[in-house]
Amino acid sequence: MSLYTDKVMDHFENPRNVGVIENADAIGEVGNPLCGDIMKMYLKVEDDVITDIKFKTFGCGSAIATSSMATELIKGKTLDEALELTNKAVVDALDGLPARKVHCSVLAEDAIKMALIDYYTKNGRELPESLVGFEPHEEE
Amino acid sequence: MRVYADNAATTYMSEAAKAKFIECLDNYNGNPNSLHSDGQRTQEVLDEARQTVADCIGAARANEIYFTSGGSEADNQALISAARGLAPNGKKHLITTNIEHHAILHTMRKLEGEGFEVTYLAPQANGIVDIKDVEDAIREDTALVSIMFANNEMGAVQPIAEIGALCKSKGVLFHTDAVQAVAHLPIDVQAMNIDMLSMSAHKIHGPKGIGALYARNGVRLLNVIEGGAQERGKRAGTINVPAIASMAVALKEGCDHMEENMAYVRKLRDRLIEGLKDIPYSQLNGDPVKRLPGNVNYSFEGVEGESLLLHLDMYGIECSSGSACTSESLDPSHVLTGMGVPVEAAHGSLRFSLDIDNTEEQIDYIIEKVHSVVERYRGMSPYWEDLETGKREHCIPE
């Protein structure tokens, strides 16, 4: 079996929602260059619905594929629904990731959470309980 | 177009090496330890192969060649023999570099666990060890210096003859892992004062699973594998004559044509290096001149090596990367970071290892596609955006 599933390779080769949203309503960024991956997500929100989402990712094939899949999974969803997105859902949607690449999906989940925090904070709204005190996972 | 540019990982077997392998399966299938005709016929093939290998590296006698399962086993046996063998004489210190293959580094770590002290020398920024550092590291109780002939990742060639002369003058054993060097660079174990040398067949168009350890007569080897009395009692196990004979053919082919082959490969290498130079914020890792004829190791800032590698693979170009994501660990190449390449630049590294089967047309194709993938992934990299906007600082000059 090859390292990556066909779905991972598809999202790597043809990533969905790549880019930047000018005047985005929220931005979330996680990771650092020393660890070899950074994800940045841009959201456009109307009436608590994510009407547009774009990402930029510095990282390996699975980092790009998980970013792409995560954006697909929450585009058009409400903020509450986006909050529910887990890294496991991203992995499942990609038909699995090798064990040592699972951290990429955690990065994707965290990037979305950071964008949501940015949105609530910018709009002077109270954070949902699950985001209070949230810190992105530290990479090893 | 398909371009295999990962010859430092493994090579394809040459036609002559394949033919020799099959010839042995058909005609020399006996166990050389058997006294009957089939065994003795096979013994002759083995003797001939041993002599060929000895001749190719300038060994004084064929019986200084011990066949092993490959480079890793040869490395293990060399270090273990020197350390455990000389420990009773009060020699408890070993010297190596931090850019060795894991077959050396992990064996050193095991010996540290047994109470040996190991000095890991860091090379200079060009990947080459300063002979002065080796000299300063040698102590009264130093048993062995083990420094690779040429580096598998970034190609830097070490001053082996100088290190050999130094070790000889200090009365210290000298081992070199020459897996990437044999059949690529001239080797003369006697002139270079090499006491032990490791080699592997599959890096030089021979079969996998076979290699050899050269140990000068007078160097005492300890067994890593116990059993029968094969290989002068130093390496047990029924002798793999088809692989050995095939290895000897591949090695001789490589050594007989080394000069013209390597002049050709060097030209391809320099064409590739030249063709990548105009990519901004990129650098060649390892000395540009004192490097393996086929090695090109480049770092591209702002992008990650695995994504470049995967995309090049879609174009039919097969290479490797020193990024963490291509390794078993979360750390990028210990070789690149060990010679002072910034971690960020090590993540964005690609290695092309070229050989005689590559063509100029392929090199131009690699150059075109590397430009294209670096541009593509910089375009979607928030790290590159930060470098461009000055939010983060470049670690590679433009």
Image (cartoon, grey):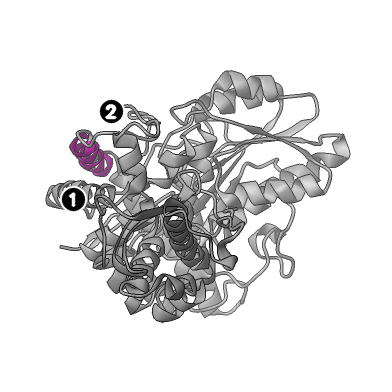
Please name whichever residue, B271 or A92, is drawn nearer the observer in this view of the structure: A92
* Badge 1 element: helix
Location of mark 1 (residue): B372
Q: Is residue B223 placed above or below B97 in the rendered structure?
A: below
Q: Chain of mark 2?
A: B
The rendered magenta stretch, by its main secondary structure, is classed as helix
Location of mark 2 (residue): B398
* Badge 2 element: loop
Between the residue at mark 1 and the residue at mark 2, the CA separation in whole angstroms equals 18 Å
Q: Chain of mark 1?
A: B
* Residue A107 counted in the magenta span: no
Task: Give amino acid for label 1.
Answer: Ser
- Quadrant in the rendering for residue B207: bottom left
* Number of numbered markers: 2
Q: Is residue B77 placed above or below B274 in the rendered structure?
A: below
Q: Is residue A19 placed above or below B141 in the rendered structure?
A: below
Answer left or right for B241 relative to B145. Answer: left
Q: Position of residue B372 (x, y in %)?
A: 18, 50
Answer left or right for B210 relative to B352. Answer: right
- Magenta range is B261-276
At 37% across and 69% down in the image, what residue appears? A48
Q: Position of residue B163 (x, y in %)?
A: 57, 26
